[in-house]
Image (tube, grey):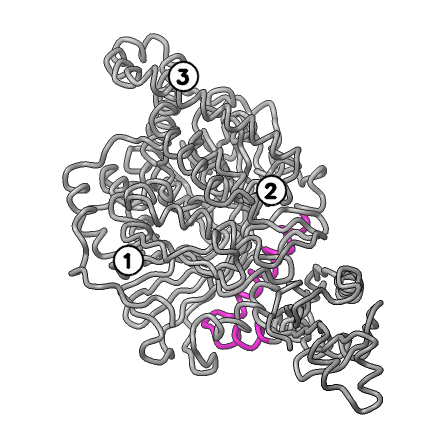
Amino acid sequence: MKDSLTELLYLEVPTPDLDAVRRWLQHQFQPAVGNTTATPDGFLITAETVARSGSSGNLGDDFLDAPVLSGFVWSVQRTTYLKVFRWGDRPFPGERTVLQQLTQALQVQFPQRYPAPPQVDLSHQSIFEALAPHYPQTVKYFQRIPNGEYDLNRVYWWEQRWRESVRNPQQPKQVVFAVEAVEDTGTQPAYDLIYIGGALGIIHAAVMARRGYRVLLIERLPFGRMNREWNISRAEFQSLIDLELFTPAEFEGVIAREYIDGFSKFFDANNPPQAKAPVLHTPTVLNVGIDAEKLLKICGDKLRAAGGEIWDETEFERVDVAPGGVTVYAKQLPTGTSRVATGRLLVDAMGTASPIAWQLNGDRTFDSVCPTVGAVVERGFEPGVWDARYGDVLFSHGDISRGRQLIWELFPGRGEELTFYLFHYHQVHPDNPGSLLEMYEDFFAILPEYRRCDLDKLTWRKATFGYIPGHFSGIKSDRRVAFDRLIAIGDAASLQSPLVFTGFGSLVRNLPRLTDLLDTALRHDLLQASHLEQIRAFQSNIAVTWLFSKGMMVPTGKWVAPQRVNAMLNTFFGILADEDPQVSDRFIKDRAGWVPFNRMALKAARTNPALLLWIWELAGPADLLRWVGSYLSFTLAALLSWLFQWLPGFARQIQPWLEPRYPSLWLWLLARSYALTYGMGQPPPPSGAAASASSAPPLSLKTPVEPRS
């Protein structure tokens, strides 16, 4: 009698066509040993002796005693999974051979595919008509989103530009030109600072305008339009209040929702016991949902009030850099009119698609990226689908899907609004740059799997999308962020791994040091590349984390156990869940020091020894060796931070004497002082008001609701 069931094989078959996989298994796969019988969801493979007995009509005893291989398939996340079990107390004859044959045959029959968007001609058709045959779900629901046609054009444009940049990294389009003199533009005004990019750019631009600088901001979109929402904590936002960009009352006015708690949980049904984890609670991480468009409007109003200008719907084309300044050439999109501006310094805030970043760094522009899609839904979910007092910080509801570990985020907003993101960590590869359109097709197909809903009953407010880049920095100098009279900030600088905060969170946390350093450089006209390269948001304590994000990427063309990434995430987040809440809070907010990092890394290796082998498999020996260099750099930086912890205070004491006499030396010393504090995730503590505000819960704490339905 068969009284045991043993799992032998778990595979992903990277296709959403479940029926095609089932038909192939039942009618085309011929095992090297035994015979196949179709079942409703898969197949049985029986030994030939059992099959011969069955032909004589007497299946009973032979079938009950002989081992049988039972396989079945199912579909979730727009892909197909297969499991094979042994039904019996002893190995099936030729068991290993059959499993190897099945695995290899499936990989040949259903290979990894990385489809690219079609080339479209929008002079004869709309973006909806062009993409409907390829991305039907995406087109269907973008037609229901306000400004959906414009946004889908934007998604398509962004993906095409990203793909071209990835495929031709050695020949980036030249947009920065060194010239001998700034063009005489006659009546064109001169500016101290010209910002290209109006999302993160407007925050920095408004701060500098209020410091008395003449500022121009150039934005390709209508100003204030955002394709992402922002979340942060009160303690982190305090930076903008301390810089006097926002008053406490204005901050309260841009809060869309404040949460009691945020949850992180990864699918672990197929994980080994040591790679399962409880829900990680983070009540002070990303617990304040910001009305991004309202925040941008306030920043824009303050920039104009301080004498700054905004040229929106204007596309950057090129910049000429001369010893005396920069000349920026742009085009006003509605009219096609050329526009020219001159200034002392250009600030690149164009994000991941920045042609300036590509020109400066070539094939080392980005090491990784998170293709991210989502939407803001006004209403339409049934009661009980989600409690608006809680956020879903990180969550997966399945294993690897078509070479990607898909991860969700959910943040309630005003009223009944819910903001969703779907993303994955991705290794940049010319054959597989990462697709926003494929991700959107996934998003609309699997949102009902993640949160119970009928998509046709939802009221859509806007689409949210973008590429979030990561650069695996070992030391701060291995990526260029500056040229003479040109500097990059935000995602265009891309100094960190996307494992940790990028974009809005990183900029806000580092805004005090970036502002102080840039103000110093401008006041003393220290605008050569050698000076500007010191003005960066590099943090040694998080540069070392790039190996973790590397371990969450499935290399292009490689087959990985479907549960592998979830198992790694659960190992690490399970350790965080066992730590004091302040430890996880500091780690997720980029503030973990050398001792906590090492303690948690050792604990992870002890808890799940297979973790090291998994990382080796995904990262490879070259990247592991490179990471050792990053770790040694981090260790040295931690030692210097401890030895020279007196330096920032001493620097401020000698500033009145040193700065006027040796301004370049002062800038160097100031940058090193910040590297010892901000660079190690240890900025000065927040003001008393901020500290008390961040420690006080926004609502009365109750027993958390069950985060999963």
- Residue 254, position in %: x, y? 26, 56
Q: Specify which label sits upstream in the sequence, 2 or 3.
A: 2
Mark 3: which amino acid? Trp
Closer to us: 494 or 657: 494
The tag on residue 225 is none
The tag on residue 613 is 2
Measuring 36% from the left and 80% from the top, which residue is drawn there?
A: 382
> Mark 2 and mark 1: span between their CA atoms?
34 Å
Mark 2: which amino acid? Leu
Please state the extent of the stretch shown in magenta in the rendering. 137-164
The tag on residue 261 is 1
The answer to whether residue 685 is left or right of residue 124 is left
The residue that mark 3 highlights is 668
Q: Main secondary structure of the magenta part?
A: helix
Figure check: 481 above or below 463: above
User: Neighbour class for label 3 at 10 Å: few (<14), some, many (≥20)?
Assistant: some
The answer to whether residue 621 is left or right of residue 452 is right
Figure check: 392 above or below 298: below
- Name the image quarter holding residue 20: bottom right
Q: Nearer the viewer, mark 2 or mark 3?
A: 2
Closer to us: 655 or 474: 474
Find out whether residue 10 is within the magenta segment: no
> Mark 2 and mark 3: span between their CA atoms?
42 Å
- Residue 606, position in %: x, y? 47, 40
Q: Nearer the viewer, mark 2 or mark 1?
A: 2
Measuring 45% from the left and 23% from the top, which residue is drawn there?
A: 635
